[in-house]
Image (spheres, rainbow, N blue to C red):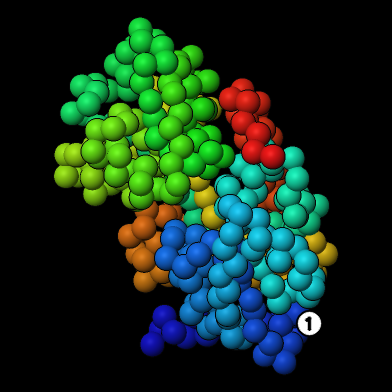
Amino acid sequence: MQRRTVLSALATATVAPGMSFAQSKPLRIIVPFPPGGATDITGRSLQEPLQRLLGVPVVIENRGGAGGSIGMAEVARAPADGLTVGVATLSTHGVNPAVFNKLPYDPVAGFVGVTEIVKAPGVIVINPAVLPIKDCADLVRYLKANPGKVSYATPGNGTIGHMWGELFKSSTGTSMVHIPYRGAGPAINDVLGGQVAVYFDQVASSLPHVKAGKLKALAVSWPQRLAVLPEVPTYAELGYPQANEPSWFGLVAPAGTPADAVVRIQRAVATAVQEPDVRDRLAGQGLYPSGSTPAEFSQQIVREIEKMKKVAAYARIKLD
């Protein structure tokens, strides 16, 4: 009862007079990817707590397609009334602007950042039956001695995995051949089957295969070692700090959305992701709560775009 009382007080404070959510109009959260993936899970984890904290209905709408571009374009076109937000990702607001000359949305001018919801650590894994490597330093030595003879798999050209792979190559001064697949499923299946030796992935999806001994994790992109992989060093520990930044999911609103509405949503999200049930649900997907301020998240998006543009230029990745 005490916890409910506290949450009720928070909700009352969040929906103070002057808020854009008048007359109980619903808040739309547009997820720019199909149902079931980490982006969708992130958005849906907020639905119930935001309804409670903001005091309005919250509707999740999946608008997948074109690497998230269709959904993000819809967010950018929505009225700037504080009633529509979208789940932005490193793909939609980092990779896409770096690899496409033309997008149906402006990732910076078309939006106002609301908050980073969660971070998602990345990992480099190998099939130890194909590549008998003991650690990341061993892999770097092997790649330098055998340039272009090892392949790495990703879910496709211009995906986060592709960018992580090229960032690893540029950071370590090594050479590997990129093998793009049509999705994460076929990619990891071929790594497990031994057709490709190396894979760049989010920790959550590779972890079961690492625990089963089918894949070996060599490094993670996270500020410190992960509790679920305590024996695996971070890229920063290994001397590659530029490769140490994880993926993320956040919320953006259409440009021009009133600042009071943006702040209220941010505060509600920051509260929601720290609720034990929400935090546990996200942790089960390898997602770690954040809740940054609108200014911090807006600045983060600009940095990510510039970083991904450098990676794309290094790897000569252009998809249009």
Q: In this rendering, would 139 be left or right of 52?
A: left
**Residue lying farthest to the bottom in this orientation:** 23
Q: Residue at x 76, y 71 (%)?
A: 78
Q: Residue at x 46, y 29 (%)?
A: 178
**Which quarter of the rendering shows the N terminus?**
bottom left
For label 1, the residue is: 18
Q: Position of residue 112 (x, y in %)?
A: 74, 58
Judge the density around disc 1: few (<14), some (14-19), many (≥20) Cα neighbours within 10 Å. few
Q: Total label count? A: 1
Using the rendered image of the protein, determine whether residue 307 is visible from the camera's viewpoint: no
Q: Residue at x 79, y 73 (%)?
A: 79
Displayed quadrant of residue 142: top left
Q: In this rendering, would 229 be left or right of 166?
A: left
Secondary structure, mark 1, is loop
Q: Position of residue 33 (x, y in %)?
A: 54, 61
Displayed quadrant of residue 209: top left
Vertical side of 229 occupied by 49: above or below: below
Foreground residue among 272 and 45: 45
Foreground residue among 225 and 191: 191
Amino acid type for the residue under numbered disc 1: Gly
Displayed quadrant of residue 151: top left
Q: In this rendering, would 231 be left or right of 151?
A: left
Vertical side of 27 occupied by 183: above or below: above
Q: Position of residue 14 (x, y in %)?
A: 64, 78
Q: Position of residue 305 (x, y in %)?
A: 67, 40
Using the rendered image of the protein, determine whether residue 153 is visible from the camera's viewpoint: yes
**Which quarter of the rendering shows the C terminus?**
top right
Q: Residue at x 41, y 12 (%)?
A: 147
